[in-house]
Image (cartoon, rainbow, N blue to C red):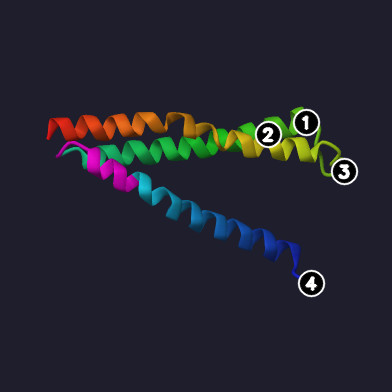
Amino acid sequence: WGLDDRLFSIGDDVVQSALGEVGFLPLLVLAAKICPPGIEGALFAALMSIFNLGGIVSTEAGALLTDMFHVSETDFSNLAPLIIVCAASSLFPLLFLGWVRGAEDEKAMLD
Protein backbone atom coordinates (compact mmCIF):
# COMPACT_ATOMS: atom_id res chain seq x y z
CA TRP A 1 0.00 0.00 0.00
CA GLY A 2 3.04 2.20 -0.04
CA LEU A 3 3.18 2.61 3.75
CA ASP A 4 6.69 2.89 5.16
CA ASP A 5 7.66 -0.15 7.29
CA ARG A 6 8.83 2.00 10.19
CA LEU A 7 5.57 3.94 10.24
CA PHE A 8 3.61 0.69 10.11
CA SER A 9 5.53 -0.87 13.00
CA ILE A 10 5.27 2.24 15.17
CA GLY A 11 1.56 2.62 14.36
CA ASP A 12 0.96 -1.05 15.11
CA ASP A 13 2.71 -0.71 18.47
CA VAL A 14 0.69 2.38 19.40
CA VAL A 15 -2.62 0.82 18.41
CA GLN A 16 -1.80 -2.45 20.17
CA SER A 17 -0.82 -0.61 23.37
CA ALA A 18 -3.99 1.50 23.36
CA LEU A 19 -6.26 -1.48 22.74
CA GLY A 20 -4.42 -3.47 25.40
CA GLU A 21 -5.19 -0.79 27.97
CA VAL A 22 -8.85 -0.73 26.94
CA GLY A 23 -8.93 -4.51 27.24
CA PHE A 24 -7.50 -4.22 30.77
CA LEU A 25 -10.41 -2.04 31.96
CA PRO A 26 -12.85 -4.92 32.60
CA LEU A 27 -10.30 -6.54 34.91
CA LEU A 28 -9.95 -3.29 36.85
CA VAL A 29 -13.74 -2.97 37.15
CA LEU A 30 -13.98 -6.54 38.41
CA ALA A 31 -11.15 -5.95 40.87
CA ALA A 32 -12.91 -2.85 42.18
CA LYS A 33 -16.07 -4.89 42.73
CA ILE A 34 -14.43 -7.64 44.77
CA CYS A 35 -11.78 -5.55 46.54
CA PRO A 36 -12.14 -5.15 50.31
CA PRO A 37 -12.47 -1.48 51.34
CA GLY A 38 -9.26 0.29 52.21
CA ILE A 39 -6.78 -1.67 50.08
CA GLU A 40 -7.75 -0.42 46.63
CA GLY A 41 -4.34 1.18 46.03
CA ALA A 42 -2.42 -1.93 47.04
CA LEU A 43 -4.64 -4.11 44.85
CA PHE A 44 -4.16 -1.79 41.88
CA ALA A 45 -0.38 -1.81 42.40
CA ALA A 46 -0.39 -5.61 42.62
CA LEU A 47 -2.50 -5.92 39.46
CA MET A 48 -0.23 -3.57 37.54
CA SER A 49 2.85 -5.47 38.72
CA ILE A 50 1.33 -8.76 37.58
CA PHE A 51 0.27 -7.18 34.28
CA ASN A 52 3.78 -5.85 33.63
CA LEU A 53 5.37 -9.16 34.62
CA GLY A 54 3.00 -10.91 32.21
CA GLY A 55 4.19 -8.62 29.43
CA ILE A 56 7.82 -9.45 30.13
CA VAL A 57 7.12 -13.19 30.34
CA SER A 58 5.09 -13.15 27.12
CA THR A 59 7.86 -11.33 25.24
CA GLU A 60 10.45 -13.83 26.41
CA ALA A 61 8.16 -16.80 25.73
CA GLY A 62 7.53 -15.47 22.22
CA ALA A 63 11.26 -15.19 21.60
CA LEU A 64 11.81 -18.70 22.95
CA LEU A 65 9.05 -20.15 20.76
CA THR A 66 10.39 -18.32 17.73
CA ASP A 67 13.79 -19.87 18.38
CA MET A 68 12.31 -23.33 19.02
CA PHE A 69 10.39 -23.21 15.72
CA HIS A 70 13.55 -21.97 13.94
CA VAL A 71 11.81 -18.92 12.52
CA SER A 72 14.26 -16.21 11.58
CA GLU A 73 14.42 -13.12 9.40
CA THR A 74 15.38 -15.34 6.46
CA ASP A 75 13.48 -18.57 7.20
CA PHE A 76 9.68 -18.46 7.57
CA SER A 77 9.06 -22.13 6.87
CA ASN A 78 7.65 -22.81 10.36
CA LEU A 79 5.83 -19.51 10.73
CA ALA A 80 2.33 -21.01 10.37
CA PRO A 81 2.78 -23.52 13.22
CA LEU A 82 4.33 -20.78 15.36
CA ILE A 83 1.33 -18.52 14.79
CA ILE A 84 -1.06 -21.36 15.67
CA VAL A 85 0.80 -22.14 18.91
CA CYS A 86 0.91 -18.45 19.87
CA ALA A 87 -2.79 -17.98 19.11
CA ALA A 88 -3.72 -21.12 21.06
CA SER A 89 -1.64 -20.00 24.03
CA SER A 90 -3.63 -16.76 24.22
CA LEU A 91 -6.67 -18.90 25.06
CA PHE A 92 -4.95 -20.38 28.13
CA PRO A 93 -6.35 -17.77 30.60
CA LEU A 94 -9.87 -18.92 29.75
CA LEU A 95 -9.20 -21.97 31.92
CA PHE A 96 -9.17 -19.70 34.96
CA LEU A 97 -12.48 -17.92 34.40
CA GLY A 98 -14.13 -20.17 36.99
CA TRP A 99 -11.94 -18.56 39.65
CA VAL A 100 -13.38 -15.16 38.76
CA ARG A 101 -16.95 -16.39 39.19
CA GLY A 102 -15.99 -17.99 42.49
CA ALA A 103 -14.49 -14.72 43.75
CA GLU A 104 -17.63 -12.80 42.76
CA ASP A 105 -19.87 -15.36 44.51
CA GLU A 106 -17.70 -15.31 47.62
CA LYS A 107 -17.82 -11.51 47.73
CA ALA A 108 -21.61 -11.56 47.35
CA MET A 109 -21.93 -14.00 50.26
CA LEU A 110 -19.73 -11.81 52.49
CA ASP A 111 -21.77 -8.67 51.79
The answer to whether residue 21 is above or below residue 59 is below
- Mark sitting earlier along the chain (3/2): 3
Residue drawn 81% across and 32% down? 70
Which residue is tagged 1?
A: 69
- Circle 2 packing at 10 Å, graded few (<14), some (14-19), many (20+), is few
Q: Give the percent coordinates (x, y) of residue 98.
A: 38, 30
Q: Which amino acid type is shown beneath numbered disc 3?
A: Thr
- Mark sitting earlier along the chain (3/4): 4
Stretch of the chain drawn in magenta = 28-37
Horizontal side of residue 87 vs 74, given as left or right: left
Residue drawn 15% across and 39% down? 38
Distance Cα–Cα, label 1 vs label 2: 10 Å
Which residue is tagged 2?
A: 85
Distance Cα–Cα, label 1 vs label 4: 31 Å
Numbered disc 4: secondary structure = loop
Q: Tell whether label 4 touches label 1 (CB within 8 Å).
A: no
- Mark sitting earlier along the chain (3/1): 1
Which residue is tagged 3?
A: 74
Disc ID at residue 2:
4
Numbered disc 2: secondary structure = helix
Relative to the observer, which residue lies in front, 75 or 27?
A: 27
